């Protein structure tokens, strides 16, 4: 059950990336379908986060969820929006990843 909870948490993190990146495509919430998809992804990711929290400590689950979302959105921005790829920015992403991996290892 624990492994399934981590898989659900990973899916929740991917949906967090989807809604956070998707906001950019709503054009200030003026485009219907991107806006609908963002809301659906947001509700789904919160539901999956709550499911994962049944077997993963809340603090750990939330931190991992936020870490997946943060790293994913930053990487999406670098790959698709031409955002900065400075060494300092990459180092910060590495620190977030290290924290997420660390929390997984101690939970």
Image (tube, rainbow, N blue to C red):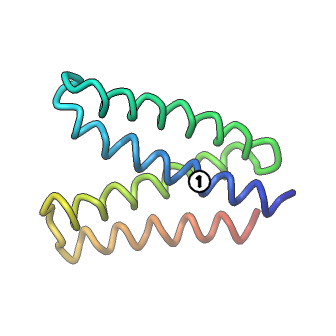
Q: Position of residue 83 (x, y in %)?
A: 15, 61
Q: Position of residue 5 (x, y in %)?
A: 76, 54
Q: Is residue 38 left or right of residue 67?
A: left
Q: Secondary structure at mark 1?
A: helix
Q: Residue 105 versus residue 16: which sits nearer the camera?
A: 16
Q: Residue 31 versus residue 88: which sits nearer the camera?
A: 31
Q: Quadrant of the N terminus?
A: bottom right
The answer to which quarter of the image holds residue 96 is: bottom left
Q: Quadrant of the C terminus?
A: bottom right
Q: Position of residue 3 (x, y in %)?
A: 79, 63
Q: Residue at x 17, y 73 (%)?
A: 86
Reading the image, the residue beneath label 1 is 11
Q: Decide: is 37 above or below 104.
A: above
Q: Position of residue 70 (x, y in %)?
A: 40, 54
Q: Residue at x 25, y 68 (%)?
A: 89
Q: How many marks?
A: 1
Q: Decide: is 89 above or below 26.
A: below
Looking at this rendering, what residue extends furthest in the right direction? 1
Q: Is residue 81 left or right of residue 36?
A: left
Q: Is residue 84 left or right of residue 3?
A: left
Q: Residue at x 60, y 57 (%)?
A: 10
Q: Residue at x 58, y 48 (%)?
A: 12
Q: Residue 87 versus residue 28: which sits nearer the camera?
A: 28
Looking at this rendering, what residue extends furthest in the front direction? 33
Looking at this rendering, what residue extends furthest in the bottom direction? 87
Q: Residues within 10 Å of mark 1 (few under 14, many from 20)?
A: some
């Amino acid at each position: 059950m624990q492994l399934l909870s981590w898989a659900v948490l990973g899916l929740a993190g991917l949906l967090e990336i989807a809604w956070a990146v998707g906001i950019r495509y709503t054009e200030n919430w003026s485009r219907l379908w991107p806006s609908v998809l963002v809301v659906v992804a947001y509700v789904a990711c919160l539901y999956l986060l709550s499911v994962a929290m049944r077997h993963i400590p809340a603090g750990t689950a939330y931190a991992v969820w936020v870490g997946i979302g943060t790293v994913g959105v930053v990487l999406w921005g670098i790959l698709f929006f031409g955002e900065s790829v400075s060494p300092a920015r990459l180092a910060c992403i590495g620190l977030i990843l290290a924290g997420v991996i660390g929390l997984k290892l101690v939970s």
